[in-house]
Amino acid sequence: LINYLKVISNRIVIRNNKLQLKFQLDDQLDCHTNKLKKIKSLKKKIRLLDEKIDSKLDSKIDSKVNKKVDSKVDSKIEKEKNEYINKKQSLINEITLLDNEIIDINIDSLNHQI
């Protein structure tokens, strides 16, 4: 009877451990999902910034073609372009950080499973 109870107790412990691991993996999956959503959002922002930069460059080219550009307008457009490029780089850096966090979580998860 004691051996039987020990076996049942061990099975309960194993089931409990499996449940804890499942909850941890579910939490990690939620974390991954949220980070991937954020990456998608950041990539969309980058695309919009690219479109704005393209639009600014197109308007700059058009205005140069029309020969209505003076140095003030030129420098203003250049400044805006640089601001957009800086924002884009910031978003790319944020995506990289999120990607690295996801990789770290995956490695931690694999180590835990091993």
Image (cartoon, rainbow, N blue to C red):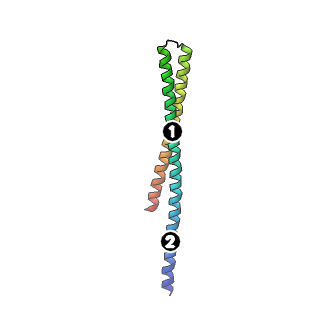
The answer to whether 33 appears left or right of 114 in the picture is right
| Residue 62 against residue 29 in the figure, above or below | above
Taking 97 as reference, is 80 above or below it? above
Residue located at (47% from left, 57% from top): 109
Counting residues from the N terminus, which is met first, the one under dot 2 or under dot 1? 2
Residue at far bottom of view: 1
Helix, strand or loop at disc 1?
helix
Residue 14: image x %, image y %? 49, 72
Q: Residues within 10 Å of mark 1 (few under 14, many from 20)?
A: few
Element under disc 2: helix
Mark 1 residue type: Lys
Q: Quadrant of residue 75?
A: top right
Q: Nearer the viewer, residue 88 or 101?
A: 88
Figure label count: 2
Which callout, 2 or 1, points to the residue nearer the camera? 1
Q: Residue at x 55, y 28 (%)?
A: 83
Q: Residue at x 50, y 27 (%)?
A: 53
Q: Which residue is mark 2?
A: 15
The quarter of the image holding the C terminus is bottom left
Kindly indicate whether the residue at mark 1 contacts the one at mark 2 (C-beta within 8 angstroms): no
Real-space CA distance between mark 2 and mark 1, rounded to the nearest whole angstrom: 43 Å
Q: Disc 1 designates what residue? A: 44
**51 and 27: which one is in front?**
51
Type of the residue with mark 2: Arg
**The one of 88 and 93 positioned closer to us in this rendering:** 88
- Across and down, in percent, residue 93 comes to 50, 38
Q: Which mark is residue 4?
A: none
Residue 5 position in % (x across, y down): 51, 83
Q: Position of residue 108 (x, y in %)?
A: 47, 56
